[in-house]
Image (spheres, grey):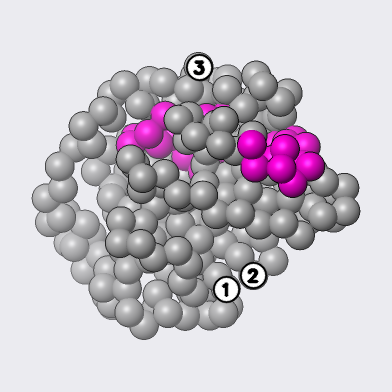
Amino acid sequence: MIFKQVFDQKSSTYTYIIASSEGREALIIDPVLDNVEDYIKILNQLNLRLVKVIDTHIHADHVTGAGKLRDKTKCATIMGEHTPADAVDIKVKDEEIIKLDHIKIKAIHTPGHTSDSFSFLMDNSLFSGDTLLINGTGRTDFQNGSSADAYNSIFNKLLKLPDETLLYPAHDYKGEKVSTIGKEKKSNPRLQVSNVNEYIDIMNNLNLKKPSAIDYNVASNLKLGC
């Protein structure tokens, strides 16, 4: 298997390129529009054929490159079934399996950050979008977010995975690239709560600024960045 983690400096977004070393089919998770040419260069250098692109949710802090990648490579675009983006080719259900040659990736509905948020599990690697971050969790104050839903998604779904499961988030603002479920259980400050009400209280008092280009980004992402 081929695995590449690409970082976008402007939005602190991690994009993941996954490919089968046998059939040379590739999949990209959470592409950024500004970096599409870089992804294509990587694909060409590795002699890979892009067949699928996944967005974990409708992002607010950058414009997705999914639409442009589809136009350039004829790949299929994928999001969870609750996405409001009608332009998506394939909408997967909770626990549905996405296949890439011999690689299998399970879709997991993890609402909370947004109502359409999905995470994706490949063997012992979890691509958590903005639901679970390294030493943090995704904010829940816009796009039909819900702190109660986020608590359920994190504590009753993601944290039930084995402790050794590798955590690959869609964003990191401190240079961290990967964690584990076990490490997050022990050290993530937002997870040191005993019930849902304590978690809701934390999330209600973050006092975060509204993303500067959220209206433009969300409108663009509903059209897959096109």
User: Would you say residue 83 is visible in this rendering?
Assistant: no
Residue 83 relative to residue 151: left or right: right
Q: Which residue is drawn at 18% across and 37% down?
A: 210
Instruction: Report how far apart the C-alphas of labels 1 and 2 lie in the structure.
Output: 5 Å
Question: SS at mark 3?
Answer: loop
> What's under tag 2, amino acid-wise?
Asn
- The answer to which quarter of the image holds residue 219 is top left
Q: Does the magenta stretch include residue 108?
A: no
Expressed as whole percent of the image width and height from the top left, the position of residue 212 reads 21, 32
Question: SS at mark 1?
Answer: loop
> What's under tag 3, amino acid-wise?
Cys
Residue 174 relative to residue 104: left or right: left
Could you tell me if the residues under marks 3 and 1 are in contact, i.e. CB atoms within 8 Å? no
Q: Mark 1 points at which residue?
A: 165
Q: Name the residue under label 2.
A: 124
Question: SS at mark 2?
Answer: loop
As drawn, 127 above or below 40: below
Could you tell me if the residues under marks 1 and 2 are in contact, i.e. CB atoms within 8 Å? yes
Expressed as whole percent of the image width and height from the top left, the position of residue 109 reads 54, 50
Instruction: Report how far apart the C-alphas of labels 3 and 1 lie in the structure.
Output: 35 Å
Q: Is residue 49 magenta?
A: yes
Segment tinted magenta in the rendering: 41-66
Circle 2 packing at 10 Å, graded few (<14), some (14-19), many (20+), is few
As drawn, 17 above or below 36: below
- Label 2 or label 3, whichever lies nearer to me, is 3
- Label 3 or label 1, whichever lies nearer to me, is 3
> What's under tag 1, amino acid-wise?
Thr
Specify the farthest residue to the front. Answer: 45
Instruction: Report how far apart the C-alphas of labels 2 and 3 lie in the structure.
Output: 33 Å
Q: Mark 3 points at which residue?
A: 226
User: Would you say residue 9 is visible in this rendering?
Assistant: yes
